[in-house]
Structure formats: C-alpha cells, structure tokens
Image (tube, grey):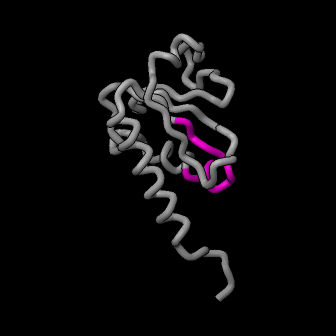
Amino acid sequence: MIGFPGSIYDAEGTSLITGLPDLTPERISLHPCRSMVARDAMSPVAQVWLLADDAEFPAIPRAFKEAALALMSAGRAILILSRRPEPGADVRDELLAGFELADALPDENAAT
C-alpha cells in the first residue's frame, strides 16, 4: 500500500499494511479530527483511514478511491482520522463527491 498518504486499517483496527502496528486507543486519541463517509448514518465501518498530516486527496491511489466507493456502495463506511481538520475534510469531501457522481451515473447493465 505504498503511496497512500497515511495508513489503512480494517474495522477492528488491524493494519492492512504489512509491518505497521495495529491501531490502539492511544494512537487513535492522537487524531482528534474524525469523520465517517457513508451512504447513511447507520453504515458499519469497513475501513479506517489514518491520514498523514500533509495528506491530499490527489495523492491517494486510484485503486484505494475505487475500493472506498465500492465499500460505500455496499452500505459500508470509511472512518477518516487526522490530527488536523483540513486533510480529513478534504478527503471526506472528495470521497463524497466521487460517491455522488458514481451514484448519479447510469447503470451500464440496466436494460434500456
């Protein structure tokens, strides 16, 4: 997962990047800016994105963005944690915009 501006974990806080430690309550507490990106408020968390302080949405690999949109389409959520509000808000807003765009596109498999 080289290239992601931070770290990614599953819903239980297990690192999805080999060699990185799992999330602990102490580590989570260092990232007070939190937002959940989901289709609705009751969505279970599928992944936790712990952002680097200088994270920017364009730096996130396309495969990660597509995977996040697929999780959201399946009714799951991405929990974004950051130390500063700006990186988290930027990533959250861009993921939501991508989800709204993807949701508005016609289904290629639908009968016409």
Horizontally, is 5 left or right of 70 in the view? left
- In the image, is residue 34 part of the stretch drawn in magenta? no
Answer above or below: position of 5 versus 107.
Answer: above
Image quadrant in which you'd find residue 85: top left
- Provide residue 92's location: percent of width, then percent of height: 44, 45
Answer above or below: position of 105 versus 21.
Answer: below
Residue at the extreme left: 54
Is residue 1 visible in the rendered image? The answer is no
Answer above or below: position of 32 versus 25.
Answer: below
Magenta range is 69-79
- Provide residue 16's location: percent of width, then percent of height: 59, 26
Image quadrant in which you'd find residue 9: top right
What residue is rendered at 50% in x and 42% in y? Answer: 64
- In the image, is residue 77 part of the stretch drawn in magenta? yes
What residue is rendered at 56% in x and 32% in y? Answer: 48
Task: Work out which quarter of the rendered image holds the C terminus and state it.
Answer: bottom right
- Provide residue 36's location: percent of width, then percent of height: 54, 41
